[in-house]
Amino acid sequence: MTIIETPTPAPASLPPGTRGRFGLSDRGFRWTLGAAALVVAALAAWFLVSIVLQARPAFSTLGFSWIFQGTWDPSHGKYGLLPFILGTLEVTAIAVVLAVPIGLGTALALAYLVPARTRAGLSTTVELLAAVPSVVYGLWGLVVLAPVFRDTVEPFLTSVLGWTGLFDGPDQGVGLLLAGVILFVMIMPTMVAISRDVLAVVPNEQLEGAMALGATRWQVLRKVVVPGARTGLLGAFTLATGRALGETVAVALVIGNSPYIAHSIKSPAATIPSLIVNNFGEATGTELAVLFAAGLVLLVIGITVNSVARWLVWSTAGPSAGAAAR
Amino acid sequence: MTVLADLPADPTVERRRAVQEAAASSLRRRKIGSGIALGVCWAFLAIAIVPLVAVVAYVVVKGLPAWNAAFFTQSTVPEGIPGGGVWNAIVGTIVITGIAIAVTVPLGLVVGLFLAESDGRAAASLRFTADVMTGVPSITVGIFGYIAIVRNYGYSGLAGSFAIGFIMLPVIVRAAETAFRGVPTSLNEAALALGARKATIARRVVVPTALPGVITGVLLAVARGLGETAPLLLTIGGNQYLQWNPTKQMASLPTTIYNSSSQPYADQVQLAWGAALLLVVVVLVLSIGSRLLAARLRKERR
Amino acid sequence: MTDAGIVTTGAEGGGAQSTEAPPTPTGAVVMTLDDVAVSFSGRTAVRDVTFDVHAGEVTALIGPSGSGKTTLLRALNRMHDTVRTAAVTGTILLGDLDVYAPTTDPTLLRSRVGMVFQRPNPFPTMSIYENAVAGLKFNGVRKKALLDEAAESALVAAALWDSVKDRMSAHASTLSGGEQQRLCIARALAVEPEVLLMDEPTSALDPIATKRIEELVVELKERVTIIIVTHNMQQAMRVSDRCAFLLMGDDKAGELIEYGPTVQLFSEPSDPRTLDYVNGRFG
């Protein structure tokens, strides 16, 4: 769990030789501190350089078009990343489409509907569940949920929604749908924790203002609370999306690991992280370089989404919102 | 003073009537709508809680039977062979996480102190870098561990520590900085006035006051580090046998769970549940512990 | 403030006295309070409140802080409903509607009894227009013609129309503090309530804005009956026709000491405590 906290904002820059906050201008001491900071900076730089350097051969050998080609067959020199990009997007989409309304409703319930006494306990429970390791969700999904999906959920959904064309193919349990649902369960604590925090800080006087005009409880929530928290809610949603995009082991265990573009929501598929984790051990040469490049692609996506999200959350609810968020 | 009843043609009265009419006729619809919407929120709350509780419940119910003496004392056995335990994985997790903690906690604290101390642009960039590091996908961290260590020295527990440490470091840095910034400058000034040396102040005043906040952050970072699987899959190589030496390949609880989950053998899956329960218990204890500490912190501050 | 509220006979609550002034027609009674008390978790905050509110007048609730004025005011539009520990006893009548009857719907009540708060609280995500019509929309009014008409009328009444008519889609946060408060008043007025409750509406504003709102209050009373809480005696003298003076008793609960025409309360009050208060000996 990452504590999303920021210290009190610091002034732009101070004249050299100024004593620090604690007056620790003692040279030896500051030198130690500075050295440690350099180590971390160097580590970050090393990371960036390594990933980029190892990813470069893939682009210099294969160009850039391989990213969007649809066939992955390393034994025949085909390195199309499209099935995995689509898989990542589809699985994340399922998770997010479920998590946004359900997460928002849950957060509203926790912030405004649940009696004050049980509020803290329930919220803590949801947040603690963010600490459950993803591999455990994967285990549960594979061993417990997959048979249920195969025998009950998928047949039911196919009979009800089969006309949409999304539910073709056999009921296998593992696949996009299960992976999406497991991801949904996993990102919920994050989504709910942050959403609840930003919803709860909408100033009480606005709620009273709406009430005094004759609004029903739902009208107050819908027209005043949710709009008032919308930037932070967007941040929560983005953070949850970011987490879903980067999730590896839980998805890898339940998605069926098929390198083909999925044609149905029940199809087995694969994501970029699952591709990397499954093939890394035995990959060599070009395939390995492509995996490095895929890692770089994932890095860029992950950092962008994460940064946007945190900026959105901080600009509303302040530095310590959603302390249980990853 | 006019009494309103004396002005029948007053547009105010007309509008009042129109508003009241609209209000009265829409009341039922609005109230039912409100009730339904709120009911949906409650339903969603239930939908959110049920699977989360179900996961923990399943882990407990299926994992507990796996906890026998063999589980804790024997190492994993090849697939298909019954029995065995996860002792090698427990040892691996302890060693790998232990090394990661031993390196990142002091480093993170010192960097956190640095950031709390300095307000220049260099510090701002470092702070930004630490924040960005928290957004790196864990598989990419694993790739880095592979490039940096495994390529040159082979799979090992140390490579795993390196990767886990990379994940834990920014968490500790930010938590430490927040904790150190929370120490009131007045404390420091009082100590200075008494003639104390600056480094002594750091040691005697700043660190102890910030300690609860720091410990909270460290506990959370460790909980996070314990749960990471993907980076380890790419760095530690796995080991069926007990191995204490971190320079060699090792097993770990998360990787054991991962590898055993997809096995068709019931014994292996049983082992996975047992290991999962162990992980969940440790992680929850750390998380709850850090919360209790944070709550006590807040109480003392008031 | 010449002939404001000099009462002859007619419906009054306890405590007020008639004066031998030239007879002036009284406003009909629009609200009645009878032995009203508010308590939280059994601890009484205000009690023994009995008086009538007359239409077309400004009634001020005055008294030192802690005397329960705001608590009493918020009981009138059932704002304590959301506070689980709150209990309101006694009878409050709006016309012939029992405000606390189980069959009375609070949301409908609040369309008839509006409220303006101490600190301006326009909805920040809504434009000026949307703020003005917010109350109407909450109450199910859909017709654009009625919305526009009510908004304009209310903004005119709040002396805000001229400054905002060309920027109705601007955000409420672009207005100054005093303007925001007038927007809140307009927002409340647009619903055409019969009674407008005002909880120290000028205490967060500068003196110039305060003066403008006080003038507004006097202008508005013909259109809507106003009950205003104020801790400022001079303000009460300037704007109100009648005053209810509340004081905290030894049991830490506020009680109604005296109620009557403002002029009389401030010049010849019947209760010595009122005399002390208006002479500035405490509060």
Image (spheres, coloured by chain):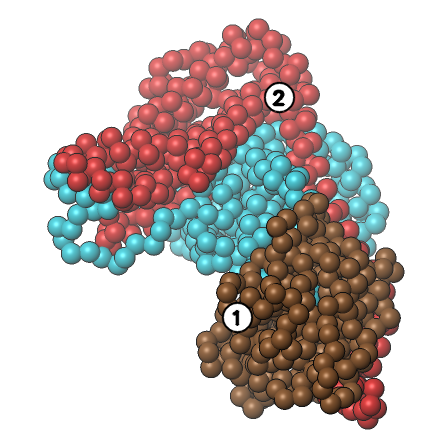
Chain colours: A cyan, B red, C brown
Q: What residue type is labelled 1?
A: Asn
Task: State which mark lies toward you, 1 or 2.
Answer: 1
Q: How crowded is mark 1: few (under 14 residues within 10 Å), some or many (20 or more)?
A: few
Question: Which x, y percent locates residue A172?
Answer: 73, 37
User: Is there any visible trace of residue B141 in the rendered image?
Assistant: no
Residue under the image location 64 percent in, 19 percent down: B63
User: Is there any visible trace of residue A120 in the rendered image?
Assistant: yes
Helix, strand or loop at label 2? It is helix
Question: Which x, y percent locates residue A219?
Answer: 71, 63
Q: In this view, does C12 lie to the left or right of A44?
A: right
Residue under the image location 55 percent in, 66 percent down: C276
Residue under the image location 71 percent in, 45 percent down: C42
Mark sitting on residue B273: 2
Helix, strand or loop at label 1? It is loop
Pick whichever, C74 or B84, lies toward us: C74
Per the image, the residue denoted by label 1 is C279
Residue under the image location 53 percent in, 38 percent down: A248
Question: Which x, y percent locates residue C174?
Answer: 49, 77
Mark sitting on residue A178: none
